Amino acid sequence: MKKAKSLITLISISFGAPLPGDEQLPIISADFKISVFAQDPLVRNPCAITFDQQGRLCVGMGPQYRSPTKDTPGDSVWILSDEDSDGEAESRKQFATGFNSIQGLAWKGQDLWVANAPDLTIVRDLNGDDIADEYTRVYTDLGNLEHGLHGLNFGPDGKLYMSKGNSKGLTEPPERVAPAPFRELWGIADSAHFEDPTPIIFTSETYKKNYHNPRDDWGISGGILRCKDDGSQLEIISRGFRNPWDIAFDDRFDWLGTDNDQTMGDKIIAPFFGSHFGWGHAWSFDWKGDGHLPTAPSSGPLFEGSGTGIVFCKVPGYPEKYQNVFFYNDWLNRETRIYRTKWDGAWRKADRENLEILAHAEGGRTMPKSSGRSFDPVDIEIGPDGAIWISSWGRQYGAHFEEGKIANEGRIYRLWPRAFSPSNGNNTLPVWGNASAQDLIGKLGSHLPVWRTNAQEELIRRGKEILPLLLKRLSKDGNTTSLETWLIWTIGRISPDQNWFDLNTNQKIQSLRLQAFHQTITQEVVEALNDPEPRVRL
């Protein structure tokens, strides 16, 4: 069991008083505002959150965590609605149900991907009534919910990235077999002799999750993996993790996350292709990894907590001090922290040892229970309104029942700088197929994952006829870094021959990644080995 005692001294930026009349709210930075978007009974133990293409909040929650039996009701995905645009949810609608513990959500097109170990599931609404009709079990046997599947993100390469803890599957063919990359992470003997199962499609009436005992053992290692948007071509990107709950990438498609440990402190990680971060290393273990050549180094101070959700922030209108930062949650210490990057060559580091705190609950919790302010932060996202949205778990560690019904608390908070005005109102977008190319290009730079992902896929669908427009926009001055990154990937995915741009460091890095994506090596790649910028050489 962890203790809520920090290995480092965390300092806060100047904190203001909580709002009058509500001692349950977290204490926040004096230059921020906070509101409650939803609370129990509308949400109980809210875990994973994401936004659909209409800008509505989708919440994964239910009674599955922490000790489910085969008969425990499934978790559900709910759409929360703010019908009068006053910043508070009035109603919810069940979009999909019957899952294991939901610990990750990601939209792409009409597909909602649901991480609910031991399963990875896609659900689709086929008739537009906001109720999923089709359930596809993409993978199964991914291990239990303790160190399960999290961190679903679609990158500009069109692939789904995921973080996986070191809980291992049962490997009981033919039905209970995980794809080979997962089995490789766990060290399953004779793994190559098992045939990977194919996805199975269900209706909402026939869908049934697979059960995995939450007390089953661990495998050797967790990892960061990626696959195509149909689940094929699954591969390991990075390994050597114990339980990386969430990952996020910045506007240059560089990753950051946290990895949980029981005894040596949670670690801030910056995964990259081929890296090993120490856990389960075959011949030379080092947890922090700094100065230890066999393993990738950490990217910040260790902390005795429980890192959960993380998000990159670059929102137009935010003060400069909150641009180009990551916000990440610590469930055990009940804090949201600020990570600012300082590059040391190609090594991403925090710019300080004492990380600033954006919000806190005046103290941590024990594993079984919390008290005081209602702030037990889990997931975190930037909403369509530009505010920071945080899901706050209930008081108990797992599901708590009264009179046969789940009775945990829960909250969804919105935070934003006082100098910024979050937008309210209807965020519905036009049908992607009818949107102009200019509108789609504008959405490529969006901070909302579903908007930039859907815009990119529609541009790619339109094909080479829009390449001149994309290239013209890329050549313009004043593009944001995010828009530049997504433009390069959109161009390169439409036309593999358009794979080298070098007006700045970011263009070179994305071009090198494009060449790796298409498995090509040009003269520019060879010359990049001598580039003065270490991140290009890496």
Image (tube, helix red, strand yellow):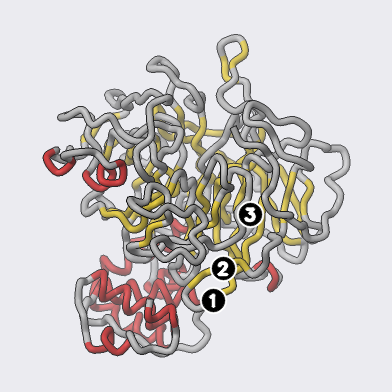
Left or right of residue 110, residue 363 in this image = right
- CA neighbours of label 1 inside 10 A, class few (<14), some (14 to 19), many (20+): few
- Counting residues from the N terminus, which is met first, the one under dot 3 or under dot 2? 2
Task: Give coordinates of residue 97: x percent, y percent.
Answer: 41, 29
Which dot marks residue 349? 2
Give the residue at mark 3.
388
Residue visible at 42% across and 49% down? 279
Distance (Cα) linking label 3 and label 1: 29 Å
Q: Nearer the viewer, mark 3 or mark 1?
A: 1
Is 103 situated above or below 13? above
Residue 317 visible in this rendered orientation of the protein: yes
Mark 1 and mark 3 in contact (Cβ < 8 Å)? no
Which dot marks residue 344? 1
Distance (Cα) linking label 1 and label 2: 7 Å
Residue visible at 25% across and 52% down? 234
- Counting residues from the N terminus, which is met first, the one under dot 1 or under dot 2? 1
Q: Quadrant of residue 130?
A: top left
Residue visible at 70% across and 39% down? 375
- CA neighbours of label 3 inside 10 A, class few (<14), some (14 to 19), many (20+): many
Q: Amino acid at mark 3?
A: Ile
Q: Amino acid at mark 2?
A: Lys
For label 2, the SS is strand
Is 157 situated above or below 428? below
Q: Amino acid at mark 1?
A: Asp
For label 3, the SS is strand
Along the line of sight, the residue nearer the viewer: 91 or 145: 145
